Image (cartoon, rainbow, N blue to C red):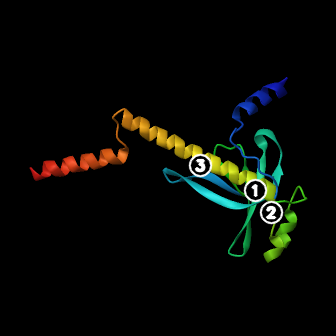
Amino acid sequence: MLKPLIGLVERANLKSDVPDFRIGDRIEVHQKILDGAKERVQVFEGDVIGRQNGGIRETVTVRRLVQGEGVERIFPIHSPRIAKIVIKKAGAVRRAKLFYLRDRVGKATKIKDDVKRQTKIDLDLKQAAEAASKAAQEAAARATAEGGMSKTAQKKKARKEAEASKKK
């Protein structure tokens, strides 16, 4: 009785923009952090050494080296605190968990590159960048066609008007 209701609530809260990353990939996790009254984004880049659970409870373990010391963090993928996840490099591994990397040092921690997946990732990133620039150009063209100005242009105009009124 409760299982279908719980599933319905979970499906509503799943993120749709989670990229298809795998174990061994190098990813950037952009996490929203409350810093006093401000909210900022902190980036944690490292190798995926494990994925656990599924659905809304899915977590990913990311490991990186900081000043020669290994640091691991576990991120809930569908959390509202996670702004975005970016795949930096595709890795080819033959294990579901890479906990053996904890005992290794230096070049022994290197993960082999998955060239086929990397070309697809690079192509997707390029297309996304082109789409974003095209959307920005269209928005700027629409704003100028409507007679509007950009925020910086408005600020410059207001500054000039203020200076002109001071001179009088």
Q: Image height check: is 143 above or below 167? A: above
Residue toward you, 21 or 33: 21
Where, quadrant-wise, is the N terminus in this rendering? top right
Mark number for residue 129?
A: 3
Question: Where in the figure is residue 147, as x and y percent of width and height?
Answer: 33, 34
Horizontal arrangement in the rendering, residue 29 relative to residue 56 (left or right): left
Question: Where in the figure is residue 24, as x and y percent of width and height?
Answer: 81, 59
Q: How far apart are marks 3 and 1 (CA)?
A: 16 Å
Horizontal arrangement in the rendering, residue 136 relative to residue 52 (left or right): left
Which residue is label 1 attached to? Answer: 118
Which badge, 2 or 3, comes first in the chain's sequence? 2
Which residue lies most toward the left here? 168
Element marked by disc 3:
helix
Which badge, 2 or 1, comes first in the chain's sequence? 2
Amino acid beneath label 1: Gln
* Circles 3 and 1: CB atoms closer than 8 Å: no
* Circles 2 and 1: CB atoms closer than 8 Å: yes
Say how many tags the image has: 3
Which badge, 3 or 1, comes first in the chain's sequence? 1
Which residue is label 2 attached to? Answer: 113
Q: Please tell me how crowded label 3 is: few (under 14), some (14-19), or many (20+) other residues with Cα within 10 Å.
A: few
Question: Where in the figure is residue 17, as x and y percent of width and height?
Answer: 68, 41
Element marked by disc 1:
helix
Amino acid beneath label 3: Ala
Name the quadrant containing residue 96: bottom right
Residue toward you, 135 or 23: 135
Q: Which residue is drawn at 24% across and 50% down?
A: 159
* Residue 131 visible at all: yes
Q: Please tell me how crowded label 1 is: few (under 14), some (14-19), or many (20+) other residues with Cα within 10 Å.
A: some
Question: Where in the figure is residue 46, as x and y percent of width and height?
Answer: 72, 62
